[in-house]
């Protein structure tokens, strides 16, 4: 399926009509139009090189909260991405024969935070719970269009909001807020026509006129509302269908500096390009996912992957992924059904520094519109790992372990590359080294590294890897990977890499959590991360141990993450410490919170 067609947007169109639309979209009919002038807009906040996002597709809010204080708290993931939290159409109002399809979340009825995934209170609780465990929340937001509606009769959304075509009173929209209504109605047919792509309706979904001030303000108010619940950033769905100048104007109305990643699916010869949107934030690089499939599960050797980046024609800054909720239901990228190859692609993406990675965990399906597991009332059932449809792939060490590898190697360049056929290896400066064998037979190889001598724990197998003279020899089985990094095991020789913390912190309340944060990746680069969380079991003394390489000098502070999600920082200047050459560094301090 051409990658610029959105499979979720099927409110009332049959297979023959859809096939005709695909054909029309794929064949150039007019010369490409020139791109508009570059945006005069400040880019949004960027995530750091150690950050990674876990897209928890169709997980309900209570299940995400439970995962954040469970397995995710011990992983390296720094953000989770939720499905759209807005009120949407009812499951029975999907395309005939596709009741309760997953794509109903992408048909907004209002901007109420009330959906079959949970209530506003549950969403807020989820955000606070994840933040307390060092994990931020990014929301997938649908701001290009509203739901397809009947032109003659009212319907009600999930939360009871009344709507019909071009009329969404609870969102604040009437026909004057949309492109091409009445006799001017048009649907997208020609993807070579910029105006048509950005002002006509996407398979019946009502296209908002985002050039209007009141529409921009309404959308910005929705995003601000999500930020008031603690949301740290947004994935902008269907950003390609919003003029980049309009989207920049909307984001300039939004409070703060949230992270932004935009869905702009490029295609050769089309007038709308990814580069138009880079002044706003990251842009999802779909070609990255296509190339991963081709090199790990296709005709090209995996050894070439170590050079992935702008030299491959990718846009930067980029959001990268192995699969997402759209592509996993097509044929251009891998999905969970690819088994070990999918996991190898996830491991590579997390180990390699290009872009901001969004890993993916969802549910099994037998057709492209299949709903997630549902309760009798139509709400999404709790995710149960180990049984049922949810795959829970994120619990695999190829994902959670490699997210930790990414955090530990943040900011380090690719060095000491090696490749042969479908096997490859590379280092991340002097902090980590990864080997991926996508081939059908095992490899035995001595790998040159920049790592300190010592014993390391492989994050994939849990086995021990010994570096001596800057090298290690390993046998890596077919369709497996190996990854080691400083601080995981006793890597770095016989010296210590531990910081024992005993911090007396008074002034906390039930639900508050305390972290040590600092100037190095192991302390989150001044962000609260799960590996630097302190236990309050012996309150008011908060205790924990963090792995930091011997000889490292760092600055640090203590921070309280309140139950509301807000931060309370120490008011003193930055503390400074150095990990000794042997033995653990002990930090015994007192913070009397005002």
Image (tube, helix red, strand yellow):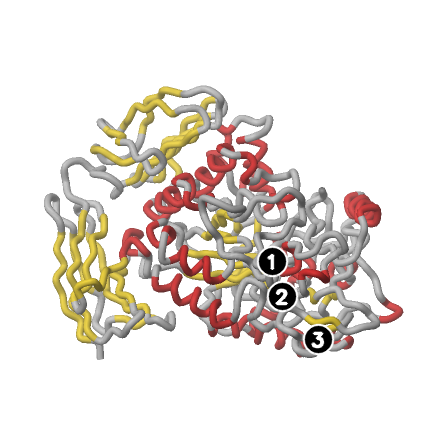
The C terminus sits in image quarter: bottom left
Q: Which of marks 1 and 3 is in front?
A: 3
Please state if 50 lies on the left or on the right of 1 as rendered: left
Residue neighbourhood size for the residue with mark 1, other residues' Cα within 10 Å, grouped as few (<14), some (14–19), many (≥20): many
Residue neighbourhood size for the residue with mark 2, other residues' Cα within 10 Å, grouped as few (<14), some (14–19), many (≥20): many
The secondary element bearing badge 1 is classed as helix
Asked if labels 1 and 2 touch by Cβ distance under 8 angstroms, the answer is yes
The N terminus sits in image quarter: top right
Q: Where is residue 153 in the image (x, y as percent from the top left)?
A: 81, 73
Determine which residue is flagged by label 1.
Answer: 277
Determine which residue is flagged by label 2.
Answer: 247
Query: Which residue is found at the position 30% from the left and 35% from the top?
Result: 462
Residue at the left extreme? 583
The secondary element bearing badge 2 is classed as helix
The circle on residue 162 is 3
Q: Which comes before the other along the chain, label 2 or label 1?
A: 2
Please state if 470 lies on the left or on the right of 437 as rendered: left
Question: Total marks drawn?
Answer: 3
How much space separates mark 1 and mark 3, taking CA atoms? 34 Å
Task: Please say if 129 is above or below 352.
Answer: below
Q: Where is residue 555 in the image (x, y as percent from the top left)?
A: 23, 59
How much space separates mark 3 and mark 2, taking CA atoms? 27 Å
Residue neighbourhood size for the residue with mark 3, other residues' Cα within 10 Å, grouped as few (<14), some (14–19), many (≥20): some
Asked if labels 2 and 3 touch by Cβ distance under 8 angstroms, the answer is no
Task: Please say if 289 is above or below 480.
Answer: below
* Residue 319 appears in the rendering: yes
Q: Which comes before the other along the chain, label 3 or label 2?
A: 3
Give the quadrant of residue 323. top right
Residue at the front extreme? 376
Task: Please say if 78 is above or below 457.
Answer: below
């Amino acid at each position: 399926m051409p990658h610029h067609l959105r499979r979720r947007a099927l409110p009332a169109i049959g297979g023959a009509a859809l096939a005709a639309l695909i054909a029309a979209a794929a064949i150039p009919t007019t010369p490409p139009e020139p791109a508009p002038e570059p945006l005069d807009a400040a880019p949004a906040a960027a995530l750091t090189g150690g950050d990674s996002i876990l897209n928890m597709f169709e997980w309900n809010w209570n299940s995400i909260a439970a995962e954040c204080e469970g397995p995710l708290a011990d992983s390296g993931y720094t953000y989770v991405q939720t499905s759209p939290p807005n009120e949407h159409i009812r499951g029975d109002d999907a395309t005939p024969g596709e009741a309760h399809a997953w794509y109903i979340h992408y048909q907004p009825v209002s901007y109420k935070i009330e959906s079959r995934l949970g209530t506003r209170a549950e969403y807020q609780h989820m955000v606070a719970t994840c933040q307390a465990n060092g994990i931020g929340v990014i929301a997938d937001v649908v701001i290009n269009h509203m739901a397809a509606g009947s032109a003659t009769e009212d319907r009600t959304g999930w939360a009871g909001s009344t709507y019909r075509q071009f009329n969404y009173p609870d969102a604040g929209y009437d026909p004057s807020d949309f492109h091409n209504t009445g006799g001017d109605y048009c649907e997208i047919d020609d993807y070579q026509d910029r105006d048509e792509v950005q002002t006509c309706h996407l398979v019946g979904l009502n296209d908002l006129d985002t050039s209007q001030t009141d529409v921009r303000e309404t959308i910005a108010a929705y995003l601000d509302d999500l930020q008031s619940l603690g949301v740290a950033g947004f994935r902008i769905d269907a950003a390609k269908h919003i003029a980049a100048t309009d989207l920049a104007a909307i984001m300039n109305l939004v409070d703060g500096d949230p992270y932004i990643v935009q869905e702009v699916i490029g295609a050769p010869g089309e007038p709308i390009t990814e580069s138009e949107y880079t002044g706003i934030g990251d842009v999802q690089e779909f070609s990255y996912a296509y190339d991963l499939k081709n090199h790990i599960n296709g005709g090209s050797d995996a050894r070439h992957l170590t050079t992935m980046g702008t030299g491959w024609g990718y846009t930067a800054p980029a959001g990268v992924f192995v699969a997402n909720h759209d592509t996993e239901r097509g044929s251009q990228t891998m999905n969970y059904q690819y088994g070990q190859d999918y996991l190898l692609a996830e491991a590579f993406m997390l180990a390699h520094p290009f872009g901001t990675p969004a890993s993916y965990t969802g549910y099994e399906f037998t057709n492209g519109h299949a709903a997630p597991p549902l309760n009798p009332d139509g709400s999404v059932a709790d995710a149960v790992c180990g049984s049922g449809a949810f795959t829970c792939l994120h619990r695999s060490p190829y994902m959670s372990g490699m997210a930790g590898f990414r955090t530990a190697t943040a900011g380090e360049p690719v060095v000491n590359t090696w490749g042969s056929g479908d096997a490859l290896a590379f280092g991340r400066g002097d902090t980590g080294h990864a080997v991926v064998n996508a081939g059908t037979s095992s490899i035995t190889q001595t790998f040159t590294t920049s790592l300190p001598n010592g014993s390391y724990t492989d994050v994939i197998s849990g086995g021990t890897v010994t570096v001596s003279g800057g090298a290690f020899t390993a046998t890596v089985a077919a369709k497996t990977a190996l990854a080691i990094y400083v601080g995981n095991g006793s890597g770095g020789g016989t010296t210590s890499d531990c910081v024992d913390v005993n911090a007396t912190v008074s002034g906390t309340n039930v639900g508050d959590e305390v972290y040590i944060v600092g100037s190095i990746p192991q302390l989150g680069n001044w962000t609260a991360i799960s590996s630097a969380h302190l236990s309050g079991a012996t309150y008011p003394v908060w205790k924990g141990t963090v792995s930091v390489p011997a000889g490292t000098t760092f600055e640090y502070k203590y921070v309280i993450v309140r139950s509301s999600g807000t931060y309370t920082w120490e008011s003193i200047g930055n503390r400074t410490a150095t990990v000794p050459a042997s033995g653990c560094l002990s930090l015994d301090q007192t913070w009397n919170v005002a």
